[in-house]
Image: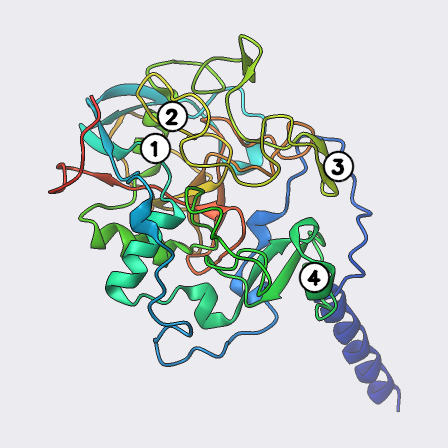
Amino acid sequence: MWKGFFLGLYFTVQFISAVQDTCSSFSYGRSLNSGKQDCGCSVLKRNNSFKKGGKITDGKSREGKINLKSADHERTNSMVFLKGGKFFMGTDKPFLPMDGEGPAREVGVNSFYMDVYEVSNAEFELFVNSTGHVTEAEKFGDSFVLEGKISEEVKKDIHQAVAAAPWWLPVKGAHWRNPEGPDSHIRERMDHPAIHISWNDAVQFCKWVGKRLPTEAEWEYACRAGLQNKKYSWGNKLKKDGQYMANTWQGTFPTRDLGQDGYAGTAPVTAYPANSYGLHNMLGNVWEWTQDWWTIRHSVHYQENPKGPHSGRDKVKKGGSYMCHKSYCYRYRCAARSQNSADTTASNLGFRCVSDELPRGVKLVK
């Protein structure tokens, strides 16, 4: 009798716990007054999405070949040449030590080429129209979107959220063409970064253009742009000469982004001044995927062209996004880092590519 009672009690507790892990009333009871809090995007994994399987199962695009007049936009696939060298990667003063920001360690990288800009919607559309690629957000049938960006009409059909970050909602039909769901579109955002892009999607795009994703070391080398022991690409202060240098969050997260930097949400890939290496938006705007598997343990010994662990569960992303603010997600720093699974997609996840040689037809910016 007692054995049956305790077994029943055990399974009841397990069921309630599972519901709490996936359901939310979308209220924000979590304290957001510390920079060591975060926007929750690192917990966005496909096993936290509530529908593993969308309408697209045959690898064919639901909308077919759609010309959004990407050809009418100036190409943003140009690259800069970065001469290799040594630098100190990471920091001995980690703000988020649990992310593996430290220690500072000397690293060498070979010369490489890097995209001046994050991959835009216009560039990504050329890829999709040429290859028929269907993104993982389209295949799964949903993707994660910040609640404040979703229309009330779309919210009516959403009854679950991520418990650890209830401002992230799984929106059916959200993907790169429809960033906030079926009633949104990128027609007026062709020069903004492509979002809802998984690591796997990014790898396929880079292969198509004859490029690859950067290693974390290459990305950080490019972000620092020759500066050592500095937080940002331009120094230690968020503003330079009173001017915003990156697209981050101003206001009360997650309910109101004041857009004092010029944008509430993503910004054009050409926005904000380039760093001294000629690279735009290395910090803020959207997170950028890297090649590396995630680890928080790093060798203190000198390494040449490190590529991270041979395997893992998550991939490293760098740069922070428009959702970051110093008071809760202070990750728009060169040493900062986060992670997601390779099939995760969200409305602040994008990428840029690098190459060992300049691909044919790509403009080199001096």
Q: Are marks 2 and 3 in contact (CB under 8 Å)?
A: no
Residue 253: % across, % down: 72, 38
**Among numbered discs 3 and 1, the one appearing first in the sequence:** 3
Spatial CA span between label 2 and label 4: 34 Å
Rendered image: mark on residue 32: 3
- Side of 200 relative to 97 (left or right): left
**Which residue lies at the image location 31% right of the left edge and 61% below the top edge?**
128
Spatial CA span between label 3 and label 1: 29 Å
Q: Are marks 2 and 4 in contact (CB under 8 Å)?
A: no
**Which residue lies at the image location 75% right of the left edge and 37% below the top edge?**
32
Report the front residue among 23 and 364: 364
User: From this viewpoint, is residue 229 visible?
Assistant: yes
Q: As shown in the figure, which amino acid type bears the numbered disc 2?
A: Cys
Q: Is residue 226 above or below residue 111?
A: above
Report the front residue among 340 and 119: 119
Q: Are marks 2 and 1 in contact (CB under 8 Å)?
A: yes
**Among numbered discs 2 and 3, the one appearing first in the sequence:** 3
Q: Which residue is mark 1?
A: 219
Spatial CA span between label 3 and label 4: 18 Å
User: From this viewpoint, is residue 300 visible?
Assistant: no
Residue 298: % across, % down: 40, 34
Spatial CA span between label 4 and label 1: 32 Å
**What is the secondary structure assignment of the residue under circle 4?**
loop
Q: Which residue is mark 2?
A: 223
Residue 167: % across, % down: 70, 51
Q: Which residue is mark 4?
A: 161
Q: As shown in the figure, which amino acid type bears the numbered disc 3?
A: Leu
Report the front residue among 3 and 240: 240
Q: As shown in the figure, which amino acid type bears the numbered disc 4?
A: Ala
Q: Is residue 252 above or below residue 245?
A: below
Q: Are marks 4 and 1 in contact (CB under 8 Å)?
A: no
Q: As shown in the figure, which amino acid type bears the numbered disc 1?
A: Trp
